[in-house]
Amino acid sequence: MRTLDEKLVKRKTIAIEEGAVVVIVEGAHKDLKGTITKVTGDRVQLRLKLNDKVIELAKHKMKVDMGDGSERKRSRDANLDNPKKDKKAKKEKKEKRSRKEAPLWMLSDIRVRVIDRNMQQGKLYLRKGRVIDVIGGLQADVLLDASDGRKSMRIEIHQDQVETALCKEGGFVLVVQGAYRGKRGKLVERNKEKNRAVVQLDSDRSMVKCTLDDVAEHAPDPDDEDVEDARRDFDFE
């Protein structure tokens, strides 16, 4: 018979597996905790402790919750031993804070281009895609185009990692910043040297001038019949 001091204490699992309690470290649910209910390859299904909602995320977007602060302590101690790493951590924290303070410009159904050279070791650099949904925290779900033998893929991305993508003159755009944000129209002029775009709004046919960053190609869901009706009704002359 074991004494109290000899009794075995069940250790918390440190693996991403069913039953483990994890903390989400990226995306719209960042900092929320949940319990893993299913693991399929690189995808993990978990139930959030906050509202009992079941969501699915990639493994790299979570870490096991140790519950004792040991991971934070190890990280803090490591930074004390490495001043350069501590300086880098502070810089990253400052950048994250400035990101949160930036105004939201992304909209659903616009085309964007990836400008973050570090995403997936640069494999996504300059790829274009359609914003499917803006999910909060300046984050959005984007469906990247299939190109150069690469399949289309859906990713979650921060607006600082992309820029607006424009169509040719005569194509349709959405205004993403300024007084006309959310308005759709036809791109009448795009001048890279002057950083100017002229858009004819399809609501009242008025002409408005914007910077190139203020507009993005409109890329609606192909099944959206209302958009197609509006395009057919647009007076191009």
Image (cartoon, grey):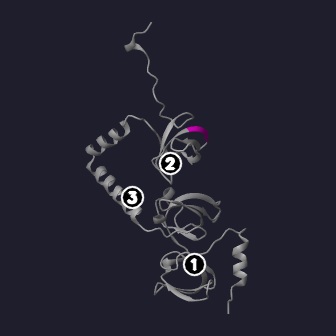
Q: Quadrant of residue 151?
A: bottom right
x and y percentages locating residue 100 in the rendered image: 41, 61
Residue 183: which numbered mark, if any? 1
- Residue ID at (61%, 87%): 204
User: For this rendering, which residue is in front, 182 or 213?
Assistant: 182
Amino acid at the residue labelled 3: Lys
Which residue is the extreme one toward the top?
1
- Left or right of 20 in this view: 84: left
The residue singled out by tag 2 in the image is 61
Image coords of residue 65 (percent x, y): 45, 38
For label 2, the SS is helix
Nearer mark to the viewer, of 3 and 1: 1
**Helix, strand or loop at disc 3?**
helix
Identify the disc placed on residue 96.
3
Give the Cα separation between the discs numbered 3 and 2. Answer: 16 Å
Image quarter hosting the C terminus: bottom right
**Magenta segment:** 36-40
